[in-house]
Image (cartoon, coloured by chain):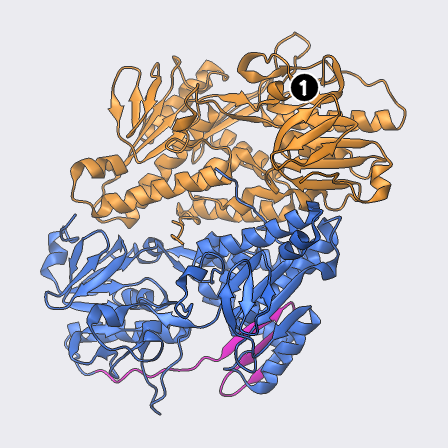
Chain colours: A orange, B blue
Amino acid sequence: MSGSIERSGNVARRRRVVVVGGGFGGLACASALGNAEVGVTLIDRRNHNLFQPLLYQVATAILSPADISEPLRRTLGRYRNIAIVLAEVSGVDVQHKAVVTSEGMRIEYDVLVLATGSVYNYFGHDEWQPDAPGLKTNREARCIRERLLLGFERAEITLDPVERKRNLTAVVVGGGPTGVEMAGAMAELGAFLIQRDFRNLARDDFRIILLEASSGILAGFDPELARYALERLQTIGVEVRTKTSVEAIEDGVVTAGGERIEAATIVWGAGVRASPVAQWLGIAPGASGRVPVEPDLSVAGLPDIYLIGDAAAARDENGKVLPALAQVAKQQGTYLGKALRAGLEGHATVKPFKFRNRGATAVIGRNAAIFQSSRFRLRGRVAWFLWALIHVYLLVNFEKRLLVSVQWLWTYLTRQRNARVIDDKF
Amino acid sequence: MSGSIERSGNVARRRRVVVVGGGFGGLACASALGNAEVGVTLIDRRNHNLFQPLLYQVATAILSPADISEPLRRTLGRYRNIAIVLAEVSGVDVQHKAVVTSEGMRIEYDVLVLATGSVYNYFGHDEWQPDAPGLKTNREARCIRERLLLGFERAEITLDPVERKRNLTAVVVGGGPTGVEMAGAMAELGAFLIQRDFRNLARDDFRIILLEASSGILAGFDPELARYALERLQTIGVEVRTKTSVEAIEDGVVTAGGERIEAATIVWGAGVRASPVAQWLGIAPGASGRVPVEPDLSVAGLPDIYLIGDAAAARDENGKVLPALAQVAKQQGTYLGKALRAGLEGHATVKPFKFRNRGATAVIGRNAAIFQSSRFRLRGRVAWFLWALIHVYLLVNFEKRLLVSVQWLWTYLTRQRNARVIDDKF
């Protein structure tokens, strides 16, 4: 199928901004262009913006996918100048200024914003993904949840000790915030469930192994906070193995040292790689596939194309590449949306993008988190409350805040998990 | 794999009750045996009890699966005499008193309770199920939700009028309570979404066709209430076609009259058939595959085997077969659990089971429901409030009541739908 998406004439007469990707960056950019004198088309292969920082809680049965997934149409539906297209973009025809989708649709642009984010980096072994899903999509989170919960169920009834051990072993690859949060949440899930709900399992039967290739976890954090996190993880029963890289994923995890760890649940959290924008634009990418951008977030030599979020390698005032973080993407999206709007309204000169670091946080478990900004270093219960407050606040609307708060409060008070659903076979 | 599930010695020494099925009946029976001097094993192929009366709300993006799915272990985990086995039962070895699972496990019983429920009856055409799922499992509900939401998304961008029409057509087969509720909820979903969120769709573009083979919908209800429901459905835009049966499901629905209705979403709600217990027991089944039972719910000639819920054909005092309803199953489960418990404690004579009709209800949409009991006939807003109160009350715990209430209140006030998630491809 081939054709223009804009069938309403009043849109077609205006300038057309096409935004690819409805993550934090793309959504912020489109929102900032809401009701502006410009036709905006947002393209995403999902119908929702996913609040990825809480996806590990879907994987550990605290929350449901819908609690952290906001339909793009719900957020943007009120802006009559914004159209949303559910499609997968497969390339950009730079010469004719059109985005091409995997189903052959062409969507023309005057200005293109690429906010396509990143994918997990399997270091050339994408075939590992089905066995070791990451935490980027609801489907992956539900898959991990099902493996975890099924593991307990199978261990409860099997008489084969090898099978039992495999079902009660979970491996997390990568000791960044995602890996730490996932390992911590699994430990709490296991401790509660096994103690209360199973007859043939003991608390210590459930093993969680966190593998980190470098010499320490949470590399981006203050060493003292990282050490606190390590101690908390060990206290709740997570085996943390540093300087251990993965050689293969087959019938479990094979480490570079040659050890095979059989595990029913494997979670991949070892670094990300930019989505293939460099390839679409015919540009040599930088580190991790990210494309260098100018101070106004445009791509050098392609003044009508802007890049924001994980796929862009923007630099701060000291020339350091900004990290691939939600807050960077969001700030870039808002900046760019406002800048494009100012351009339309004739205020052409815009200051370069400047990242304001809101601080970084990671949660290990109940009453245990770390928070670090340029001014503060916090850990323990205070950091945990702050983490919870920030994350509820960052959710997109009051309903989701209320739903997440209710479920968190319930989990906090009872240690129960609301979303322990093993999906039906059809 | 073959072996006994009961490894803890204290359970093995006691009498063993095996309950197959964790629906309303099986769960009520097991709960009534909680902490009794008997070992209980509950077997189900799911890990949760599904509150099926609200499953149509998962299919129409109001609720999430976890909101109506309560883990069996969460309900029964506190009873130390109850073990739960996640497995699919494939038969009963009546001679050796053992249940056999599809993976070859044998679980021995002294008393067997079969509470295996029913499946949708495709009248010999089970191959229709993938195209026309029913509303029995979370997976089916998510599948219907995805088809509905994807239909809107595709209709928004396609330029092919035939494809557009197909994507905007939904067919519900069967005019019982499930079919009526599903059709009504889809009409409300479509009216709101199309009006607010889509650019190229008009409210009337979305067609919902309800097919009923007999001469009227809601056959079990008072004709006046059924007529009210019909008028309400028509008011909100549902095309109700009675005396229309389905000949085939292929590229849409083919009616007995030879008309082909192309539809992106087809929902099956046309009658149920008992799960294959008759076959397991080597007994000739009655109508719809249900097995006749004695007044104490045991199977004639098999005094250690009891049957409850949809799979059992119990009779009321007038000799009329009780309907396949959640309230019948639940009352039977509680009755049987108490009776078995009384038997263990030496109070051997138990009164026959007596069904107490709590009334029947069906909801058409916002402020529109019908309620009928032996004493009352209600319709409209009052019946709707009553319906909502009853269903929140029937949910299993306070957390779920709160979560469902919040989402209902939100949907009522804003007409929004919280769970509009199209799942990611992996």
**Snapshot quadrant of residue B409:** bottom right
Please give left or right for residue A387 compared with residue B81 in the image: right
Point 50% across, 16% down: residue:
A220
Q: Position of residue A398 (x, y in %)?
A: 64, 47
Q: Nearer the viewer, residue B88 or A184?
A: B88
In this picture, is A408 found above or below A117?
below
Q: Residue furthest top?
A: A318
Q: For mark 1, what is the residue?
A: A355
Q: Residue furthest right?
A: A346
Q: Nearer the viewer, residue A337 or A183?
A: A337
Please give left or right for residue B416 compared with residue B84 in the image: right
The kind of residue on which mark 1 rests is: Phe
Disc 1: which chain? A
Please give left or right for residue A17 compared with residue B293 in the image: right
Point 55% across, 32% down: residue:
A386
**Snapshot quadrant of residue A212:** top left
Specify whether residue B37 is in view.
Answer: no
Q: Nearer the viewer, residue A371 or B422?
A: B422
Q: Position of residue B260 (x, y in %)?
A: 59, 65
Q: Position of residue A326 (x, y in %)?
A: 60, 27
In this picture, is A406 found above or below A389?
below
Please give left or right for residue A379 compared with residue B352 in the image: right
Point 45% across, 44% down: residue:
A62
Find the magenta span and give its range: B350-377
| Residue B358 colored in magenta in the image | yes
